[in-house]
Amino acid sequence: MTFHIVRSCVCATGLLAAGAFQEPRFTSATDVVPLYVTATSGQGRFVTDLAARDFTVLEDGKARPISQFESGVQTVAISVLVDESPSAVDARSRTESAAREVVRNLRTGDLAAIGAFSQSVSFSPTLTGDSEELLKRVHALGPGAAGTALWDALDAGITAVDKASGRRVVMVLTDGDDNSSFRNAAQLREQIIRSGVMLYVIGVASSDGRPNPLLRELTRDTGGSYLELKPKDNVVKAISQMMDELHHQYLLGFSPTQLDGRVHKLAVRVSRKGVTVKSRTSYVADRR
């Protein structure tokens, strides 16, 4: 799998989204590498009024022209995987509540798939926007056999959203490390880098320890987020903030210098003072 590199045509339209003016979108008639960017202020609030001129995209340290720009509310395709291994029993009420809140925060046009993992992965990869169906899937979750197939779960989640359009996300809710997967950490890391999928992790501490630290690294590398959910945390508020982030990211696109099949470093800079941005840090220059 490789990053979605989108072929698009020249267009310019003014759109209204969520009651606010959306910057005109514009694209070039070449292959475009998409970058989903979260912008926040010093107070942690989302900054939603930036223009294309406020951003600089760096590929291997060199500035690249931005040939695609979109702002406003964006749709999401998301896989949600809940850890149901015995070690997660103390956190089960929090992780399943979090999964329900993800469903309740889906918006028109969003698609999702929900499953569970323990020693193996139980997951239907069919994406749907039917919230009632998705809540039934959450309700059907239950304890599994001893073991945590974390990397296999992420593999299944990536595959489910890989062919979807727009921003593609895998969200995992887990308390532990992998000890049951057929895939290993190195294989999973390469897969997620090639896929272009963003990883969001809700980690919960348990008597057996904490989630694998590689998960935090992968959320940073893919432009996602890592949240440590403590027993007294407000699950509804935490998930609402995470889903708001997903819906209010900017889309920046640029044309790669060459499709050489190699990993290239990416960075996004913003000119407005007091604003911090995050996005994925690399891509593989292959045409899908």
Image: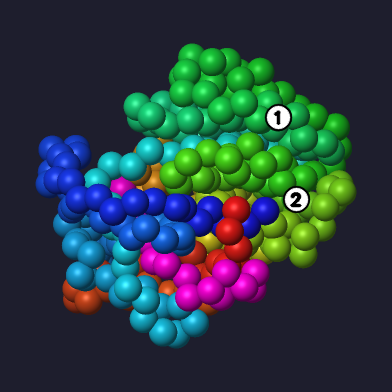
- Residue 143 in percent (x, y) is at 75, 27
x 46%, y 53%: residue: 6
- The magenta span reads 248-264
Q: Secondary structure at mark 2?
A: helix
> In terms of depth relative to the viewer, which is nearer, 81 or 189?
189
- Residue 57 in percent (x, y) is at 36, 73
Three-letter residue code for mark 2: Trp
Numbered circle sitting on residue 151: 2
- Res 199 visible: no
Image-quadrant location for residue 261: bottom right
- Residue 151 in percent (x, y) is at 75, 50
**Neighbours of disc 1 within 10 Å: few (<14), some (14-19), many (20+):** many
Three-letter residue code for mark 1: Phe
Image-quadrant location for residue 85: top right
Answer left or right for 180 relative to 138.
Answer: right
Proximity of marks 2 and 1: CB atoms separated by less than 8 Å:
no
Q: Is residue 78 above or below residue 190?
A: above
**Neighbours of disc 2 within 10 Å: few (<14), some (14-19), many (20+):** many
Lower position in the chain sequence, tag 2 or tag 1: 1
Q: Secondary structure at mark 1?
A: strand
Whole-number angstrom distance, CA of label 2 to CA of label 1: 14 Å
Answer left or right for 275 relative to 267.
Answer: left
Q: Which color scheme is applied?
A: rainbow
x 18%, y 46%: residue: 13
Image-quadrant location for residue 52: bottom left
- Residue 212 in percent (x, y) is at 70, 59
> In terms of depth relative to the viewer, which is nearer, 139 or 10?
10
Residue placed under numbered mark 1 in the picture: 123
**How many labels were placed on the picture?**
2
x 69%, y 57%: residue: 191
- Res 154 visible: yes
